[in-house]
Amino acid sequence: MKAAILFILAGLAEIGGGYLVWLTIKENRPIGYAIAGSLILILYGIIPTLQNFPSFGRVYAAYGGVFIVLSVLWGWLVDRKVPDIYDWIGALVCIAGVSIILWAPRS
C-alpha cells in the first residue's frame, strides 16, 4: 500500500509541477506558476527515494507505467480530453508491466 501511495504522489508531483511550468510557458501564466512547478518537481525527485525497493532502475521503470496511467487520468480530468479505448488498453498494459517489474519472483 505504501508503494502505491508513493508512486501516485510522485506521479502527481511530476505531472502537476510540469503542468504549472507548461502553463507559464505555453499559456502566459505568471512566473509564480513556473516557480511553484519547479519546487514541486524537486519534491518529485525526492518522493521515489522513499520506496523500499532496493533497485533504482526498477523503481523508476515501474514509476514510468504509473506515470502513464496518471497522465491519461490528468488529461481526462484537467484538460478535459476523454481517453479512448486505446488509451485505456495502453494504461492497462503499463500496469501489467509495472506489476511484472516489481513483483515477479526472482531468485
Image (cartoon, rainbow, N blue to C red):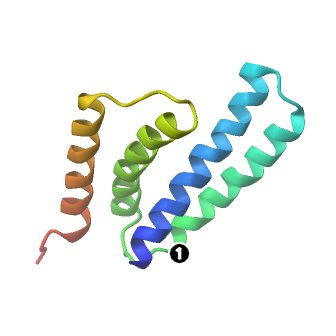
Q: Is residue 107 above or below residue 67?
A: below
Q: Nearer the viewer, residue 19 or 63?
A: 19
In the picture, residue 35 is in which quadrant? top right
Q: Quadrant of the N terminus?
A: bottom left
Q: Position of residue 47 (x, y in %)?
A: 57, 66
Q: Identify the amino acid type marked 1.
A: Leu
Left or right: residue 89 versus residue 84 is left
Picture mark count: 1
Q: Is residue 65 left or right of residue 99?
A: right
Task: Give the residue pinned by disc 1.
Answer: 50
Depth check, front residue: 53 or 66: 66
Q: For mark 1, give the secondary structure.
A: helix
Query: Residue placed at 35% from the left, 53% from the top?
Result: 61
State which quarter of the image contains the C terminus.
bottom left
* Residue at horizontal 38 percent and vertical 52 percent from the top: 66
Crowdedness near tag 1: few (<14), some (14–19) or many (≥20) residues, C-alpha within 10 Å? few
Q: Is residue 44 left or right of residue 50?
A: right
Residue 64 lies, with reference to residue 102, above or below; the image says: above
Residue 101 % position (x, y):
23, 61
Q: Position of residue 79 (x, y in %)?
A: 56, 30
The residue positioned 47% from the left and 35% from the top of the image is 76
Q: Nearer the viewer, residue 76 or 47?
A: 76
